[in-house]
């Protein structure tokens, strides 16, 4: 016992003597977010000889590396307009043509301006991870409406300059109706690593999963320059993004940063925020960044194993003081609490372990019963007013969600909700949360509606996309109530590409057979002929469906009426009943 006491005393003494004083945590306020905007001053920086970073032209940077007779471009901004502006700015610092483009990952703000840097008729190779094209297509086909709406809210669609200070990792997302996209598909892909030389520039591409599973980093060994893509930027990382995403594995993200640390770079050029110079400073930033990610992951798992529920875990996760004080870990993009809830679902799925949530009441019924507990709508409105008068804005939001679900015409609840959304938004320093509150305020006010599509794709973009993407989009838009008990096989014969695709409908269930699987298709009930490009443009809403079906489709078996009836099964409908 004496030995144990002595050891305990010794450990306490050593801890007291050796523990350094933690730096004071930064106070994150809307004013701090506004000050953070200096990160995105529009300019072309030259952090190293022959290396140019265009920052502030869009949400993401474009990075140009000069070689002997040309240049290497990394990332291309979010639109053709932004890309052209960057290309003109680069032309002022070098006349060397772009000989190759690298996509660090599949997110739209890195790939949608590529055509601006590619002279007409010139084939510029595009390097990327092998999964980039597939991930680009998935967002465009299966998740486009919901991701668009949630992204526009998160990035502050329609907000005034006083409301939208910046988006945390860039000045803004300049995507709106009239914006054009210049996406080019990757031509040089790899799985793990790729070594190559372009214009005398020797580079290594390394698969580095983090913000996306298709993320890579670019290493220039001769210059000790590292381009980390979106795995490092001057804000706490989006281990989860509120616009919606698949699981981002923090362990793999931290491991990717460890690979970067071991290279001992002397220049770090993120695809968001400003470059960093100096081996020691970069080592500190990378170490703190990976430590923050691992801390959130490890402590979340510890809390999960203790039996905490997701919201309890989220409330308990706070960075250690030295990490919370880092200028590279301020909550100007992600949040530890959001990350914790994503880690919970990423490892255990949707069920939180509480028996009450195993088969919960449907939301409307739950709201009706909540209202009954308050003595009806009048009593519920009194509870809302009391919360509003006490400044409990988050509680007002929760209460008004119930009230408006039961009665969307409840004017008192609507006004309270509007006031809460505005108050929460104006006080919020995290731009993602700030914008979501404020855009939701304007939507509820009726100032504007957030569209399901921000821009229209070009015919050239559609031509490059595989037909499988469009059939995936059909499958996830099938209205099973309209389909009912129908059992139907439709064969599409695409005359311009010489392919036959089969769509099988079985009582609300879809099966798509590619040309390789055509032998397994049953005898078709309906056979139609059309050009693949026409089919794509119709589904992408570049053509009016009624006119296109009447004039461009040929019914080889069955009738045009049958075809129109079939296509009406796939008209997407929002939760409010609008299509």
Image (cartoon, rainbow, N blue to C red):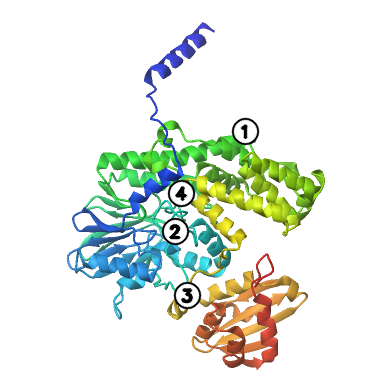
Distance in Å between CA atoms under marks 3 and 1: 49 Å
Which mark sits nearer the N-terminus, 4 or 2? 2
Quadrant of the snapshot with the N terminus = top right
Compare residues 187 and 378 and report the one nearer the observer.
378
User: Residue 333: which disc?
Assistant: 4
Give the percent coordinates (x, y) of residue 19: 39, 22
Going from the N terminus, do you reach mark 4 or mark 1 first? 1
Q: Which residue is mark 2?
A: 214
Left or right, residue 505 beside residue 287: right
Q: Nearer the viewer, residue 405 or 280?
A: 405
Q: Residue at x 21, y 62 (%)?
A: 66
* Residue at screen point 45% across, 32% down: 320
Residue 306 is tagged as 1
The reply to whether residue 130 is visible in this rendering is no
Mark 3 secondary-structure assignment: loop
- From this view, report whether residue 13 is shown above or below residue 180: above
What SS does tag 4 mark? loop
Query: Between disc 3 and disc 1, whose residue precedes?
Result: 1
Query: Considering depth in this image, is 524 or 292 the residue closer to the camera?
Result: 292
Element type at mark 1: loop
Viewer-nearest of discs 4 and 1: 4
In this rendering, would 374 be left or right of 345?
Answer: right
Give the Cα separation between the discs numbered 3 and 2: 23 Å
> Residue at 51% of width from left, 6% of height from top?
2
Q: Which residue is mark 3?
A: 457
Q: CA distance from mark 4 to mark 2?
A: 20 Å
Which callout, 3 or 4, points at the residue further toward the start of the chain?
Answer: 4
């Amino acid at each position: 016992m004496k030995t144990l006491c002595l050891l305990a005393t010794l450990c306490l003494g050593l801890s007291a003597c050796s523990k350094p004083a933690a730096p004071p945590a930064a106070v994150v306020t809307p004013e701090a977010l506004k000050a953070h905007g200096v990160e995105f001053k529009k300019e072309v920086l030259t952090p190293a000889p022959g290396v140019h970073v265009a920052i502030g032209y869009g949400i993401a940077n474009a990075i140009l590396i000069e070689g002997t007779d040309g240049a290497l471009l990394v990332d291309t901004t979010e639109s053709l307009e932004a890309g052209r502006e960057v290309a003109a700015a680069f032309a002022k610092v070098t006349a060397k043509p772009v000989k190759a483009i690298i996509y660090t990952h599949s997110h739209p703000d890195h790939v949608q301006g590529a055509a601006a840097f590619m002279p007409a008729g010139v084939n510029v190779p595009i390097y990327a991870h092998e999964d980039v094209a597939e991930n680009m297509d998935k967002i465009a086909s299966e998740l486009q409406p919901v991701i668009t709406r949630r992204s526009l809210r998160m990035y502050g669609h329609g907000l005034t300059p006083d409301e939208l200070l910046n988006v945390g990792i860039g000045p803004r997302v300049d995507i709106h109706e009239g914006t054009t996209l210049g996406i080019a598909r990757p031509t040089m892909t790899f799985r793990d690593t790729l070594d190559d030389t372009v214009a005398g520039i020797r580079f290594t591409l390394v698969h580095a999963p983090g913000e996306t599973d298709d993320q890579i980093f670019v290493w220039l060994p001769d210059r000790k320059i590292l381009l980390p893509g979106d795995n490092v930027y001057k804000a706490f990382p989006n281990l989860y993004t509120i616009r919606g995403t698949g699981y981002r594995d923090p362990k793999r993200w931290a491991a990717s940063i460890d690979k970067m640390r071991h290279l001992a770079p002397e220049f770090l050029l993120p695809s968001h925020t400003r470059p960093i110079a100096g081996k020691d400073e970069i080592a500190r930033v990378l170490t703190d960044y990976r430590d923050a990610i691992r801390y959130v992951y490890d402590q979340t798992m510890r809390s999960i194993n203790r039996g905490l529920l997701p919201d309890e875990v989220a409330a308990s996760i706070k960075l250690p003081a030295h990490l919370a004080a880092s200028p590279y870990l301020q909550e100007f993009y992600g949040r530890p609490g959001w990350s914790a809830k994503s880690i919970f679902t990423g490892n255990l799925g949707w069920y939180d372990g509480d028996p009450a949530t195993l088969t919960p009441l449907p939301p409307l019924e739950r709201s009706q019963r909540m209202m009954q507990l308050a003595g009806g709508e009048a009593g519920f409105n009194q509870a809302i007013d009391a919360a509003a008068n006490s400044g409990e804005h988050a509680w007002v939001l929760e209460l008004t969600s119930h009230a408006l679900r039961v009665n969307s015409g409840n004017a008192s609840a609507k006004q309270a909700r509007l006031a809460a959304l505005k108050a929460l938004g104006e006080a919020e320093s995290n731009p993602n949360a700030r914008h979501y509150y404020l855009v939701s305020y304007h939507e509820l006010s009726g100032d504007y509606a957030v569209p399901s599509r921000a821009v229209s794709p070009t015919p050239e973009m559609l031509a490059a996309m595989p037909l499988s993407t469009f059939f995936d989009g059909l499958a996830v838009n099938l209205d099973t109530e309209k389909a009912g008990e129908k059992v139907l096989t439709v064969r599409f014969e695409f005359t311009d590409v010489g392919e036959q695709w089969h769509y099988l409908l079985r009582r609300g269930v879809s099966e798509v057979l590619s040309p390789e699987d055509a032998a397994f298709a049953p005898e078709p009930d309906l056979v139609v002929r059309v050009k693949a490009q026409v089919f794509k443009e119709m589904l992408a809403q570049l053509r009016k469906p009624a006119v296109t079906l009447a004039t461009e489709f040929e019914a080889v078996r069955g009738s045009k009426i049958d075809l129109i009836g079939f296509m009406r099964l796939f008209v997407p409908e929002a939760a409010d009943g609008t299509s």
